[in-house]
Image: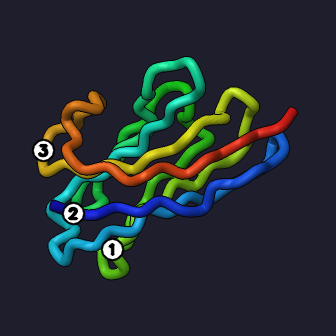
């Protein structure tokens, strides 16, 4: 297994930015594709973005395209989610998750390993 720890959440005003980090414990970090998900109160967990193990390919949900950017630094064993132009509807607990599947997957069931989540709150 790989252990994941998210950080960087907080409270920001609408239009502001946050950068989330996901730190991994496993040495063979590059074999895992990483996805970011979020879950707002009373709503189902939602896929946000995914990056391949080598960082060469990314995929975004329509709701965050043009505003969020996923990246990774395998030497540091970290994945990042840069969130710009934040909206109140972005308020949620954000999770990073890992999978060894090579295909682009957006279902939470395809990601066996999860972090504990970090709260992002966007005020209007």
Question: Does 124 sit above or below residue 118?
Answer: above
Image quarter for residue 105? top left
Mark closer to the chain start, 2 or 1: 2
Residue topped by disc 3:
101
Residue at x-position 55% and y-position 41%: 93
Query: Residue 77 placed where, x, y %?
Result: 33, 74
Q: Is residue 89 left or right of residue 44?
A: right
| Residue at figure coordinates x 13%, y 51% from the top left | 100
Q: Is residue 8 above or below residue 61?
A: below
Q: Nearer the viewer, residue 4 or 86?
A: 4
Residue 100 vs 14, above or below: the answer is below
| Residue identifier under label 1 | 77
3 horizontally vs 20: left or right: left
Q: Pointers 2 and 1 in contact (CB under 8 A)?
A: no
Which residue appears at 28% of the width and 63% of the height? 3
* Real-space Cα separation, disc 3 to disc 2, in angstroms: 14 Å
In the rendered image, which residue does mark 2 sit on?
2
Figure coloring: rainbow
Left or right, residue 68 beside residue 13: left
Crowd rating for badge 3 (residues with CA inside 10 Å; few <14, some 14–19, many 20+): some
* Quadrant of image for the N terminus: bottom left
Pick whichever, 94 or 68, lies toward us.
94
């Amino acid at each position: 297994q790989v252990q994941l720890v998210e950080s960087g959440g907080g409270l920001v005003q609408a239009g502001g930015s946050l950068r989330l980090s996901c730190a991994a414990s496993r040495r063979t970090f590059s074999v895992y594709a990483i996805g970011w998900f979020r879950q707002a109160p009373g709503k189902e967990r939602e896929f946000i973005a995914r990056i391949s193990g080598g960082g060469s390919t990314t995929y975004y949900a329509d709701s965050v395209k043009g505003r969020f950017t996923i990246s990774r630094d395998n030497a540091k064993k970290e994945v990042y989610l840069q969130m710009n132009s934040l909206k109140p509807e972005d308020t949620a607990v954000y999770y990073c998750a890992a999978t060894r599947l090579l295909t682009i997957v957006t279902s939470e069931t395809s990601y066996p390993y999860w972090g504990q989540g970090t709260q992002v709150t966007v005020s209007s």
